[in-house]
Image (tube, helix red, strand yellow):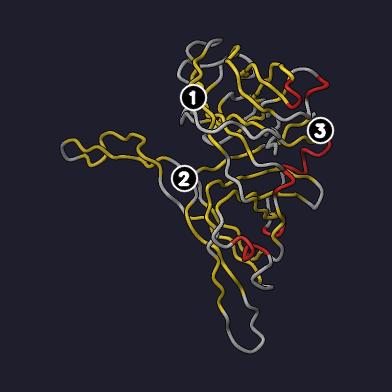
Amino acid sequence: MKLNLAITSAQVATARKPEIGLESEVYFAPENCILRGTVTALTATTGEYVSAGGADIPSAGRDVVLRCLSPDLVGVGGVMAITFNVTLEGTITDTAVATFHLPTWSGAGSLNRFPIGICADLIPTTVGNIAKKVTAIGTLVSMANMTPGNKFEIYTTPLASDFVYIEGCTSKGGAFNLPNIVEIAEGRNAAAYTKLGRSESNKLSIGFVDRGYLEQLNRFNGSQGSVRIDITKDGSVIAQRLLYSGYYVRCSTERGDGDDKVEAKSEGPYDQFFIGYPRAS
């Protein structure tokens, strides 16, 4: 499943409107996003790729995303880009590029800076191959417009067809697992120095009206996988896509009395979060 969202210039105004609760839809797939490796920029145009090892990508292929890992990830010059050699469905070889477009319509203007968790899809270069899934990630070809030290993670994502829509959601809460701030004292100053430390572990909570134990998230009780939240502004423009991977579904139901609606909730930690953002054309 891809994380970058194509919108038209005419849809930018809608995409930038404030979000309301009913605009977010929840989906679940019983598969995790799998770490495939890390890329570190050595210069503006070169880098180092380290594979994470593990099992091969499934033979059907998967979409691949590059996730911003550095807490101070900045590009120099134009759009940051990372190019890989890849193998696609049908044993086709090609190159594929992940680009971190500058959203000139955002409040940050042309500032070439991206937060932890922002993702870019790895897209095959050949036009006829754009829709094909990746079956193997090869060597790093090049990097562009990087600050030395910029670091990215490479993940495969579950197939879009494997995500099941969760109906009747009443709450969708999940803080990002961002690094904690470590305060180092000196003399009388308790925070003479501050540094980024180990990330927090936050809980993702999904509440829904209960329709039975073979319905909604109840159906996946005990399973581990990925929660997807799509934010559709004004019912027409998908303006944001979030993924929380490594989440165990643990549903419990509270039953009241009388005409009270019966609600269930699944709450617990997750491994990693991913942020997909819109791109206007």
Instruction: Give the number of the disc on residue 151.
Output: 1
Q: Amino acid at mark 3?
A: Ser
Three-letter residue code for mark 2? Asn
Q: Mark 2–mark 1 contact, CB under 8 Å?
A: no
Q: Is residue 56 left or right of residue 191?
A: right
Q: CA distance from mark 3 to mark 2?
A: 32 Å
The amino acid sitting under disc 1 is Lys
Mark 1 / mark 3, whichever is N-terminal: 3
Instruction: Return the x and y of residue 198 as percentages of the image width and height.
Output: 36, 40
Above or below, 4 relative to 78: below
Total tally of numbered discs in the picture? 3
Residue plotted at (53% across, 22% down):
74
Can you identify the residue that label 3 sits on? 9
> For the residue carrying disc 2, how many other residues have a C-alpha within 10 Å: few (<14), some (14-19), or many (20+)?
some
Which sits in the foreground, 7 or 119?
A: 119
Q: Who is closer to the viewer here, 24 or 227?
A: 227
Q: CA distance from mark 2 to mark 1?
A: 17 Å
Q: Residues within 10 Å of mark 1 (few under 14, many from 20)?
A: many
Secondary element under disc 2, as helix, strand or loop, is: loop
Q: Secondary structure at mark 1?
A: strand
**Vertical arrangement, residue 67 with respect to residue 127, above or below:** below
Residues tagged 3 and 2 counted as in contact (Cβ below 8 A):
no
**Residue in the picture at 64% in, 49% down:** 228
Q: Which mark is residue 177?
A: 2
What is the CA distance from the residue labelled 1 to the residue labelled 3? 31 Å
